[in-house]
Amino acid sequence: MFSLIRLLFQTDRITFKGTYHLGVSFFRYRTNLIALLYFVSRLHKSKTAFTIGEQSYTYEEIWRKTQGVTQFLAQNYAISPTQKTAILCRNHPMMVQCLFGLAQLGADVFLLNPEMTKEQLDILQKKYGFEFLILEEALLHLIEKKEPSFAYITTEDIDKLDFATLNVHINTNKAGKIVILTGGTTGNAKIAKHKPAVFDFLPPFLALIKDLHLNKYKKVYIPLPLYHGFGLSSLLVSLLLGANIHLTPKFEAKQACKLIANTNIEVVTLVPIMLQRMLGHDPSALKGLKIILSGGAVLHEALVREALSTLGEKVANLYGTTEGGFCVLATPKDLRKYPNTIGRAIEGANLILYNNQNQPFGEVNKIGRLFVKNAWSVAHKDERGIETGDLAWKNEEGYYFLCGRVDDMIVSGGENVYPLDLENILLRHTDIQEAAVVGIPDAEFGQRLHVFVVLRNKELRKEDLFEWCRIHCARFQQPKYIDFLELLPTTQLGKVDKKKLSSC
């Protein structure tokens, strides 16, 4: 508690009056996630919390409506601590109210991908057994024409309720879990259970304040889906800062550029391909941004250089995993120095590299499997910590550099080929806007390289690119196949969907 108060004083986010509200919030709600919303609603009552389209909501309005949602769910659906519930919604303030309302009741909340199919929803429900679902009206087709084994209600029906008639005070101290499905929409997705604890959340929050000065900015745009770990983290940090948070149901480059330019957005959190497509659409719309927080996928060196040239030192890279949380930061100055770095470990994060014999090592410039330990990650199964699934190395100054995913590494003719290295080389070609590399089976070599690119200059021919690769790529990096695409397929979050490319 005292460390949190000291931190907030240091970052000018609290007054003595705020200290009182902070104490009350923890006295009433302990470490339940609702304590955060109560605190910021008292501290920033009349400030705008959310803007979506033409609608805006103050922090006081969000708090009042959330209390109405909480009371309604408790009275009509008997939501109780540890009960498994789920939310199936696109970005909207009502989704946020439902998330905090269920958290206040101590329920475990599964955040589901609204792009899933009916079959995928069935698989997930049978596997994890959630008993109550909140979903958008537009997604009712996922459960229609059958009798689901769970109760449900739409966000639109909740939004129509008259909360003025509800006056029962809910004061649940138990903190439920937020369950994020890390594998996408399939029934084979892994889960990451986060039990929000404000004190464990301090180190990553402090890193963003100290190194990026986020407390100076008031308007934030989150195009990331809130059901994903990076989107959810962006939401919680923005709330704690008392920011005006702009949301859109989904990302479109044209719409995003217009929103950023017309509403004077200062901070945007995104995955790299979103930045790539906005720069390709209208780079001038991004000139007013103060800081661009990139995460969730690899930030290619070529994109860093393009952003530096077009926008100046505004891009920061946040590295982490759903299970391990945010743990490595590259500031804009770091990226100016090393455009291909993911940064250095933040305070409280312990990064360890392991070799193929599962032995840790501390040598620099040596590639290993990256593990992370910190207080804010989900519980890890062994003493090594959480394996990120990435191959990485570090230099003498403590900067880390990715080589790609462990399961993406391609063995071709006995040589280890890291797709990320080849993608970075391809992106140096002035006529290439996006690039992805996958391995395909080959009887002679074991695997060969299949390159997919999106062109800036449509006149580039495949034979010209093959010749360029012979000059600029190592022998073992030479592609067997090259295909030109209009767009690379992406997941709902915005990562390149290499599984889909592998099936092409």
Image (cartoon, rainbow, N blue to C red):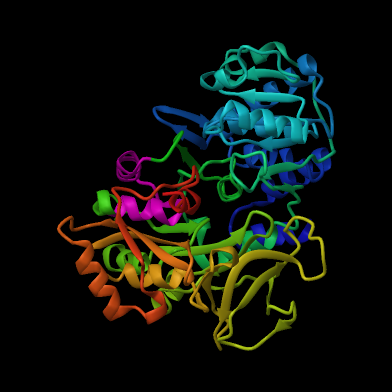
Q: Is residue 295 magenta?
A: no
Extreme front residue here?
A: 443
Where is 396 relative to 96, above or below? below
Residue 310 position, x and y percent, is 27, 63
- Please report the bounds of the magenta region as a residue range: 252-279
* Residue depicted at 69% across the width and 32% down the height: 123
Q: As rendered, which of 240 and 102 lies closer to the eye? A: 102
Quick check: can you spot residue 146?
Answer: yes
Where is 373 relative to 250, above or below? below
Where is 242 relative to 351, above or below? above
Residue 450, image quadrant: bottom left
Residue 218 position, x and y percent, is 47, 48
Q: As rendered, which of 67 and 296 lies closer to the eye? A: 296
* Residue depicted at 42% across the width and 78% down the height: 476
Quick check: can you spot residue 286?
Answer: no
Query: Is residue 241 found left or right of 264 in the rendered image?
Result: right
Q: Main secondary structure of the magenta part?
A: helix
Count the numbered circles shown: 0
Q: Is residue 273 magenta?
A: yes
* Residue depicted at 36% across the width and 69% down the height: 479
* Residue depicted at 58% across the width and 13% down the height: 160
Q: Dividing the image into 4 quarters, which one contains the N terminus?
A: bottom right
Query: Is residue 317 found left or right of 201 in the rendered image?
Result: left
Residue 173 position, x and y percent, is 84, 38
Residue 345 position, x and y percent, is 62, 73
